[in-house]
């Protein structure tokens, strides 16, 4: 009987194929190397190896890219008649739910899967990513907490669970514990990109930006290799630290270098690129024609249907590139999304307001931006990424309130942000600007009109 590293039977596998499969699982766990190539070798060695096909389908389904989703559907169809055991059938059900846009249903199905198969590291990592893509902080933390007591430190993959748990703790606001657990994970496996990024998130949320830069530099050899799928996101974290410290030149240099020099067409990399350019623009930086390249790269991904978090970031790039018609088309698709699946409800309930709010901000209609973004800001625990990624919503909302001279609202939002991150220079600047405008009142020249490109020539505006 052929088993994986944690002892699960692998239907249809050979010893050679199982070795390739474990290479793929390790690559997935560490976000480095090429898991798809290893899985190709596994299925060539054992054409009936169903779990190898299912892991391929998992990776394509969670890519949140239309072409990858289509490939995952083809793989599921190809496995329909292959022999599989109960655990493997459970994996197949979860993949089907993800592809249907039912992220929470998939996450719940995997909750039940873990109670029967607590050592299934592929299911745990896919479930953790489902929790991330639906922005469910409690489940990010508790999925691993429910399962971790079953694992000994000697079990292969134990440190990977620690890295995932660290991120869940961070997203739940348990920062000290998150940092301790993340560092423990890295002591056991220094190449764990997810654990490294969990600690980076702690430093971001605590506004420890100098610490964050030092953390990234000290550990750079472990996460910055060319074979590292997660390197762009970690570079993005370092760029955020520089931006908070007023070092916009360094942040822009990182954009031009490791973040965007490779012209990645991977959705998660382009999300980081859009979000960084948007923050730079709001900070008064002239980003030139950088939007144009990124806007074109988004064309193959933003369909208004699969994953609205990505669509919103595509809209940022299209706005920056002056492609208003594409933004309007996307808004219509999001507003008109059928409500027959969870992802469609995300599109209609939140995605449409996000795109409309960012478009209004870009066009200088700050009252409309405030209206849309104030509704959309409660995206947490509905869909979309981490607290750090979603912060661009409240940052833009606060800027819209300041530029629209909604001084009371701007002050309230600044105070809210400072309550969470009192040492953030950006947040302190928001409060100072609100106070300055409240004192100056109508004596200052009204400048709340025009495009973002015009307004951000003066970073204090």
Image (cartoon, helix red, strand yellow):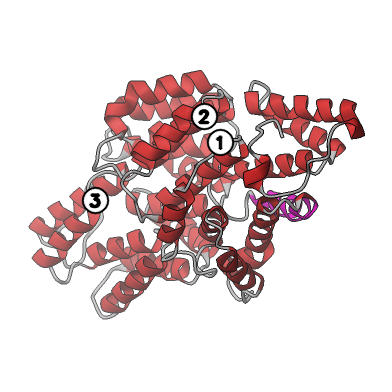
Q: Which residue is mark 2?
A: 248
Q: Is residue 436 left or right of residue 14?
A: right
Q: Which residue is mark 1?
A: 285
374 inside magenta stretch: yes
Q: CA distance from mark 1 to mark 2?
A: 7 Å
Q: Kindly indicate the quadrant of the structure image that contains residue 438.
A: top right
Q: Secondary structure at mark 1?
A: loop
Where the C terminus falls, by quadrant? Answer: top right
Decide: marks 1, 2 in contact (CB < 8 A)?
Answer: yes
Q: Which residue is mark 3?
A: 7
Residue neighbourhood size for the residue with mark 3, other residues' Cα within 10 Å, grouped as few (<14), some (14–19), many (≥20): few
Query: Does 123 appear above or below 171?
Result: below
Q: Secondary structure at mark 2?
A: helix
Q: Secondary structure at mark 3?
A: loop
Q: In front: mark 3 or mark 1?
A: 1
The x, y position of residue 78, in whole percent, is: 26, 77
Q: Is residue 405 visible?
A: yes
Counting labels gives 3
The residue segment tinted magenta is: 367-379
Q: CA distance from mark 2 to mark 3?
A: 50 Å
Q: In front: mark 2 or mark 3?
A: 2
Q: CA distance from mark 3 to mark 1?
A: 54 Å
């Amino acid at each position: 009987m052929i088993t994986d590293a944690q002892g699960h039977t692998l239907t249809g596998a050979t010893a050679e194929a199982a070795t390739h499969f474990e290479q793929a699982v390790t690559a997935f766990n560490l976000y480095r190397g090429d898991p798809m190539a290893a899985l190709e070798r596994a299925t060539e060695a054992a054409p009936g190896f169903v779990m190898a096909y299912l892991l391929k389908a998992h990776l394509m389904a969670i890519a949140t890219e239309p072409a990858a989703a289509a490939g995952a559907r083809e793989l599921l169809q190809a496995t329909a008649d292959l022999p599989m055991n109960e655990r493997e059938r459970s994996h197949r059900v979860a993949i089907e739910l993800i592809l249907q846009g039912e992220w929470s249903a998939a996450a719940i199905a995997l909750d039940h899967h873990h109670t029967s198969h607590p050592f299934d590291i592929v299911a745990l990592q896919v479930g953790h990513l489902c929790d991330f893509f639906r922005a469910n902080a409690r489940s990010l933390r508790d999925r691993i907490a429910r399962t971790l007591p079953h694992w000994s430190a000697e079990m292969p993959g134990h440190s990977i669970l620690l890295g995932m748990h660290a991120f869940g703790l961070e997203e739940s606001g348990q920062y000290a514990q998150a940092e301790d657990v993340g560092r423990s994970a890295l002591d056991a496996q220094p190449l764990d990109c997810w654990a490294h990024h969990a600690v980076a998130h702690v430093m971001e949320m605590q506004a420890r930006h100098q610490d964050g830069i030092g953390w990234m530099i000290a550990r750079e050899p472990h996460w910055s290799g060319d074979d590292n799928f997660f390197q762009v996101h970690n570079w993005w974290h370092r760029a955020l630290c520089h931006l908070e410290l007023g070092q916009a030149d360094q942040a822009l240099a990182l954009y031009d270098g490791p973040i965007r020099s490779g012209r990645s067409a991977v959705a998660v990399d382009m999300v980081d690129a859009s979000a960084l350019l948007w923050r730079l623009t709001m900070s008064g930086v002239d980003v030139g024609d950088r939007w144009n390249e990124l806007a074109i790269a988004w064309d193959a991904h933003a369909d208004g249907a699969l994953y609205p978090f990505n669509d919103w970031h595509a809209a940022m790039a299209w706005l920056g590139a002056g492609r208003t018609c594409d933004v309007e088309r996307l808004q219509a698709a999001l507003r008109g999304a059928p409500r027959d699946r969870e992802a469609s409800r995300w599109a209609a309930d939140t995605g449409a307001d996000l795109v409309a709010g960012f478009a209004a901000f870009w066009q200088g209609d700050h009252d409309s931006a405030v209206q849309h973004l104030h509704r959309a800001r409660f995206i947490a625990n509905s869909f979309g990424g981490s607290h750090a990624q979603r912060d661009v919503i409240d940052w833009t909302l606060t800027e819209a309130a300041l530029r629209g001279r909604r001084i009371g609202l701007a002050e309230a939002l600044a105070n809210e942000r400072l309550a969470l991150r009192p040492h953030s220079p950006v947040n302190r600047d928001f409060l100072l600007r609100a106070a300055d405008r409240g004192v100056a009142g109508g004596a200052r020249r009204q400048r709340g009109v025009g495009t973002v490109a015009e307004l951000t020539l003066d970073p204090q505006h």
